[in-house]
Image: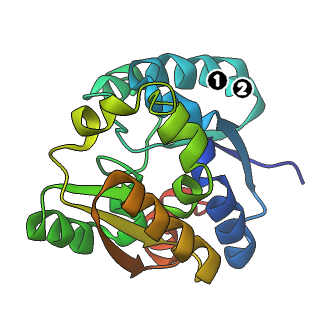
Amino acid sequence: MPASLLVIACGAIAKELVRIRELNRWHHIEYQCLPAELHNTPEKIPGAVIDKIEAERENFDRIFVAYADCGTGGLLDKALEGRGIDRIPGAHCYEFYAGSEIFHRLAEEEPGSFYLTDFLVRHFDRLVVKGLGLDRQPQLKPVYFGNYKRVVYIAQVESEKLQSMARQQADFLGLEYCYRLHGDEPLSLVLKPLVSQE
């Protein structure tokens, strides 16, 4: 039976979404992911999401958007307004990876936190170092990160290799290192009522 629900998702959460789909046996879901690099230009996210919706609207019974606000400043919600399409709640993926309550506690504990996920740890060089031009202009590091105090690695899988990489990334940024393993459960719990078949 073909999928009845299309989930338009950020490429940065693709691995987790596939694991969660298999765990919950959500065979009615198809994922289509947009490039994670859009986070470096968040103003382009709403347009890319709407283009995908328009291209696929006739092929699915329902469409759901697996993006938080992701730095669009409310523009994604405005773009989705009146289309009958919901998105995952929250300001960004760190919130749904940790769970809203825990994330807000972390943010209150230290507002100057720079967050990493498994995806960002794996692609730190491409998305952060090269993406922000720190490889070409290292003097920009204090401009971008001077107000941060720590790196918080919100992990989805337990991996010594990823933890070691995250520690090195915190050192590169000159920030304290904090590790929190939350797995896929917080994201799964957020998705369940939104993507379950009616």
Residue named by callout 2: 56
* Relative to 21, 105 lies left or right: left
User: Callout 1 environment at 10 Å: few (<14), some (14 to 19), or many (20+)?
Assistant: some
Q: Would residue 94 be visible to someone looking at this image? A: yes
Please give the name of the residue rendered at 45% of the width and 73% of the height, measured from the top-left corner: 189
- Inspect the image, locate mark 1, and give the three-letter code of the amino acid beneath it: Lys
Please give the name of the residue rendered at 14% of the width and 46% of the height, measured from the top-left corner: 147
Percent of width and height locating residue 21: 69, 66
Please give the name of the residue rendered at 61% of the width and 49% of the height, measured from the top-left corner: 123
Query: Mark 2 and mark 1 in contact (Cβ < 8 Å)?
Result: yes
Q: CA distance from mark 1 to mark 2?
A: 6 Å
Please give the name of the residue rendered at 37% of the width and 27% of the height, measured from the top-left corner: 76
Compared with residue 161, is residue 94 higher up or lower down, i.e. above or below? above
Residue named by callout 1: 52
User: Which residue is more in the foreground, 113 or 98?
Assistant: 113
Percent of width and height locating residue 195: 56, 58
Percent of width and height locating residue 66: 52, 46
User: Callout 2 environment at 10 Å: few (<14), some (14 to 19), or many (20+)?
Assistant: some
